[in-house]
Amino acid sequence: MTFTYKKAGVDISKIKQSQMAIGKLIESTHKLQKKAKIAHGFGHYAGIVEIPGGKLLATHTDGVGTKVVIANKMKKYNTIGIDCVAMNVNDIICIGATPISFVDYIAANKNDQRIFKKIVEGLVKGAKKSKMPIVGGETAIMPDVIEGKGFAFDLAGMVVGLVERKEMILGNKIKPRDVIIGAKSTGIHSNGYSLARKALLTKYSVKDKVKGVGVIGDALLKPTEIYTEPILEMVKKCKINGLAHITGGAFTKLMRLKKIGYEINDLPKTPPIMKLIGEQGVKSEEMYKTFNMGVGFCVIAPKDQTARIKSIFKKSNISSQEIGEITSRKGVFVNSLKIA
């Protein structure tokens, strides 16, 4: 049996069409506020407005997707909050912004104080690693919307950041012969779970133990790495031309920075959990378009910056390596296979 993200219920091409339609609608609001001039709008990793005093304010919102289903199956809730923070801060730092505040939104079918406390413990842990305060949030009990026999929930958040105009990184300076440095992921992070569940849980249960992987549910729940500290140090100390958080759409995300060529030919060893997913009938092209394949974040910079960038990652105990380079051949190529 062959598994694809589309067959699992997530059609990326259709989603992009929806996003484009939404983008055209929200553009009509960009001139409504005289005190906040849009510096960069829909389509990148964060929206940016210029506020009085010449400051640039960045905002972004994201959730953890169907990873919440695995948390429920495992009855383990103390790490999913880390993922929620990570999905937000890892995106906002892609434009060079420093996260300064965060709010969360928990929607559930019933009130369970013990579980809510566990979820928030994760949020706090993620916020501390990001050096960012949580300033508020909302807990909504909606049994008619969030369905499930037992406890069921969804989790999302929003981050606000500040960035100096001179430190803003949008990818427009990326040029051929720049190198792509990949920072190691901790696992699947928080994307591709509809496909992962479809591929794995047809054969296994979340409690099954597989050689090299361990308990499948534990491997799937490993928290998303937070790259805030090393990336913000690089923004100040290195010449960086592009930053990409490898999430939904995996390496196709790189095209969001600049329509140029991305040749990826030296990925790290495929993490065991992703190798197991591939073995269930997910083709290589689908894997590269859905999962991070061991690389959670990409830094694009001139080759002479490589050693310093890797050194900064190492200080944060994150391994990294040169995984490819920029070319003039438009598209994203992984091991010569065009994926975007």
Image (cartoon, rainbow, N blue to C red):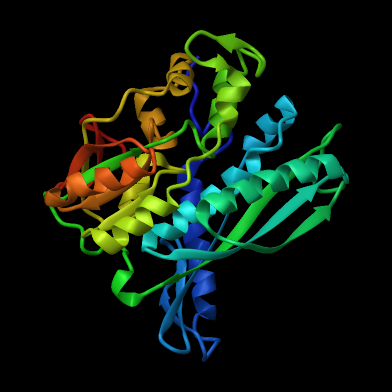
Q: Which quadrant of the rendered structure holds the C terminus?
A: top left
Q: Which residue is outermost to the bottom? A: 34
Q: Provide residue 47's location: percent of width, then percent of height.
A: 47, 68
- Residue 232: which quarter of the image? bottom left
66 on left or right of 236 = right
Residue drawn at (53%, 50%) of the image: 129
Along the line of sight, the residue nearer the viewer: 311 or 144: 311
Horizontal and vertical percent position of residue 163: 40, 71
Q: Nearer the viewer, residue 312 or 103?
A: 312
Residue furthest front in the image: 315
- Left/right placement of residue 306 relative to residue 249 reads left
Residue that protrudes farthest toward the top in the picture: 211
Which residue appears at 55% of the width and 24% of the height?
219
- Drawn side of residue 30 relative to residue 70, left or right: left
Q: Choose between 174 and 74: the one closer to the eye.
A: 74
Of the pair 315 and 102, the residue shown nearer to us: 315
Horizontal relation, residue 331 to residue 51: left or right: left
Residue 260 is situated, as x and y percent measured from the top left of the image, at: 21, 53
- Report the residue at 12% width, 50% height from top: 304
Q: Position of residue 99 (x, y in %)?
A: 50, 63
Q: Is residue 270 above or below residue 162?
A: above
Q: Is residue 211 above or below residue 56?
A: above
Q: Residue at x 40, y 86 (%)?
A: 54
Work out whether residue 258 can be spotted.
no
Does the image show residue 247? yes
The number of discs equals 0
